């Protein structure tokens, strides 16, 4: 069965942009269609890429019409030569075009030549990118040994004025090697002077990027790349659109690297990244991408490839007949319970009001009359099973009805191709271009109740993850976690999984799990709570950006975090989804 979304997606987003009755956040940011070109361009299925200058990162060219490059980052530092070579080899084998390494110290920078020799011995020629924070002297040490170097305006120097001299020296070193410079702005580490003037939103992010790009260009840099990242995909999306719109002509053609920072673990993290990246790629914005995941970075490459494969498919219109395919006669109008609106300050692209309702479309069975009791009974049993499994036991006992009325065209449907659905629906949802979501269940021919329940579980779980990633329906806590790097001193992935199990039911609460106190607190951005590694089995707890307890054991930290979350819920009135008894 085919389910229409692509044409509806374009139509819906256009309508949202021009809608008189629902202008709100969806119309913000001068959004036009999903494509940067004309309607004909959009319907041709051909990518309409923003015009950018060509920048060589060693053997990989980005911008100037080159294919979009995939980037990842090791969890090692260059002085861990053997471990770094193994990770770089695995990343290159998976299809990674550019590999970034954190270079946190002079020792790490001085190890770069040895790492390069070891890579050459293995026949690995993947371009290396050095990631340097806080220390211009380290950047200068690393520059002669990499193809690109990333600095963060938030911590390179106290002010752009103070940055002039070290930046000038760095650019000279990079030019001598023929290496590129990325100005990488992060939401969590904006310069204080800028946030005091412009706040913590897109205007400050864009200003930081533009100021450093103009200064770099004035100091002689031409091989430039820029990025603006945030863990909130709506904010990252709006900031990148604004960057494209507001960059002065002299720097308007600089290639953009896209990423959502601290996205976290597994499918939620991938979808959160898609929510930020997919709309931009559909508009032809972005020359390199990274999907930042906690854990083994090799998983990032598959997620990037699937995104890049799905974007042209979404751009390609489906045949008219498929777009208008009937959904099948059996239909249950069922809503996911606990539809509380996101309890947070709405960002420019978030919709206020009720959380998005979800309806389930069930397949017709051959020989069953439409909405036959037999069919509906089996489907309702499967639905109740899912509700119970998801912790909605009271809702699972409530009466349920069914209908054959179709909602209007602002209700996109989940495609059976989940990669395609991830691109289409994260875009619709984060744009505020969807009033609801339809989940057509397709368990195969002549399914029994068990198969039906499994299909509902799979598809609703996916829909729930899409809504959570786009913050359009928060059914559990949101976890922000760094990808981990050489500074990490504990098992980050296992810690995130443990905290997810313990605190996942607190819908709407944002918990950051960060590997170290050096960058972690600065990068937590809009988290309500921070669990930050402060050494082996030592954790600092944060409320917002304030450290409230230091040097706790992991066990103490979890206990204290539980107490603080409960207090937070009592004072803010955030609803929580209980494990049972709702
Ligand atoms: S927060 Fe610390 S451990 Fe995590 S990626 Fe950043 S520097 Fe590495």
Image (cartoon, rainbow, N blue to C red):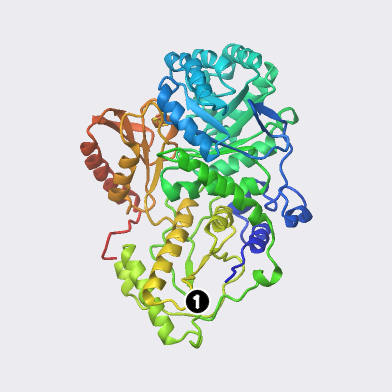
Residue drawn at the location 50% of the way across and 52% of the way down: 470
Residue drawn at the location 61% of the way across and 50% of the way down: 309
- Residue 563's quadrant in the figure? top left
Residue drawn at the location 63% of the way across and 21% of the way down: 179
Element type at mark 1: loop
- Residue 575 falls left or right of residue 260: left
Q: Pinpoint residue 301: horizontal percent, then vertical percent.
A: 52, 41
Where the C terminus falls, by quadrant? bottom left
- Residue 20's quadrant in the figure? bottom right
> Quadrant for ligand 1?
top left
Q: Pinpoint residue 522: horizontal percent, then vertical percent.
A: 43, 30
Q: Pinpoint residue 151: horizontal percent, then vertical percent.
A: 54, 23
- Residue 54's quadrant in the figure? top right
- Residue 447 falls left or right of residue 559: right
State the residue in front, 562 or 570.
Answer: 562
Please count the marks in the image: 1
State the residue in front, 454 or 49.
Answer: 454
Where does label 1 land, which residue?
363
Asked whether residue 344 appears in the rendered view, the answer is no
């Amino acid at each position: 069965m085919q389910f229409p979304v692509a044409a509806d997606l374009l139509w819906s987003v256009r309508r949202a942009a021009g809608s008189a009755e629902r202008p709100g956040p969806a119309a913000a940011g001068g959004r036009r269609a999903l494509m940067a070109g004309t309607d004909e361009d959009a319907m041709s299925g051909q990518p309409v890429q923003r015009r950018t200058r060509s920048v060589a990162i060693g053997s990989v060219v980005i911008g100037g019409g080159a294919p979009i490059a995939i980037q990842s980052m090791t969890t090692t530092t260059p002085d861990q030569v053997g471990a770094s070579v193994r990770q770089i080899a695995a990343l290159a084998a998976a299809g990674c075009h550019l590999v970034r390494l954190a270079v946190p110290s002079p020792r790490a920078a001085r190890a770069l030549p040895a790492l390069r020799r070891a890579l050459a011995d293995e026949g690995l020629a993947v371009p290396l990118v050095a990631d340097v924070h806080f220390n211009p002297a380290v950047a200068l040490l690393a520059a002669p040994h990499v193809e690109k170097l990333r600095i963060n305006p938030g911590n390179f120097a106290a002010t752009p004025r103070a940055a002039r001299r070290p930046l000038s020296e760095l650019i000279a070193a990079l030019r001598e090697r023929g290496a590129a410079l990325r100005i990488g702005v992060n939401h969590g580490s904006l310069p204080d002077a800028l946030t005091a003037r412009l706040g913590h939103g897109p205007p400050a992010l864009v200003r930081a990027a533009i100021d450093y790009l103009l200064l770099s260009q004035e100091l002689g840099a031409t091989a430039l790349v820029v990025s603006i990242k945030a863990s909130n995909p709506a904010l990252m999306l709006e900031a990148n659109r604004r960057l494209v719109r507001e960059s002065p002509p002299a720097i308007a053609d600089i290639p953009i690297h896209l990423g959502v920072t601290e996205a976290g673990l597994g499918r939620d993290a991938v979808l959160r990244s898609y929510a930020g990246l997919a709309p931009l790629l559909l508009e032809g914005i972005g020359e390199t991408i990274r999907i930042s995941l906690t854990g083994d970075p090799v998983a990032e490459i598959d997620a990037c490839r699937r995104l890049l494969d799905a974007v042209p498919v979404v751009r390609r219109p489906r045949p008219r007949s498929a777009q208008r395919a009937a959904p099948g006669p059996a239909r249950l109008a069922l809503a996911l319970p606990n539809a509380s609106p996101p309890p947070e300050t709405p960002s420019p692209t978030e919709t206020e009001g009720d959380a998005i309702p979800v309806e389930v479309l069930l397949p017709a069975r051959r020989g069953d009359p439409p909405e036959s009791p037999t069919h509906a009974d089996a489907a309702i049993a499967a639905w109740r099973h899912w509700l119970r499994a998801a912790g909605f036991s009271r809702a699972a006992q409530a009466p349920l009805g069914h209908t054959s009325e179709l909602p209007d065209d602002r209700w996109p449907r989940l495609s059976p191709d989940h990669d395609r659905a991830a691109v289409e629906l994260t875009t619709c949802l984060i744009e505020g271009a969807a009033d609801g979501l339809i989940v057509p269940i397709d368990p195969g021919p002549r399914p029994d109740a068990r198969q039906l329940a499994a299909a509902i579980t799979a598809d609703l779980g996916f829909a729930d993850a899409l809504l959570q990633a786009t913050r359009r329906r928060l059914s559990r806590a949101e976890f922000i976690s760094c990808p981990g790097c050489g500074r990490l001193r504990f098992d980050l992935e296992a810690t995130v999984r443990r905290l997810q199990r313990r605190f996942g039911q607190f819908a709407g609460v944002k918990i950051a799990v960060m590997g170290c106190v050096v960058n972690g607190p600065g990068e937590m951005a809009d988290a309500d709570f921070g669990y930050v590694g402060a050494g082996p089995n030592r954790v600092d707890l944060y409320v917002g950006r304030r450290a409230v307890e230091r040097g706790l054991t992991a066990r103490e930290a979890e206990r204290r975090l539980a107490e603080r979350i409960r207090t937070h819920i009592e004072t803010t009135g955030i609803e929580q989804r209980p494990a049972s008894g709702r």
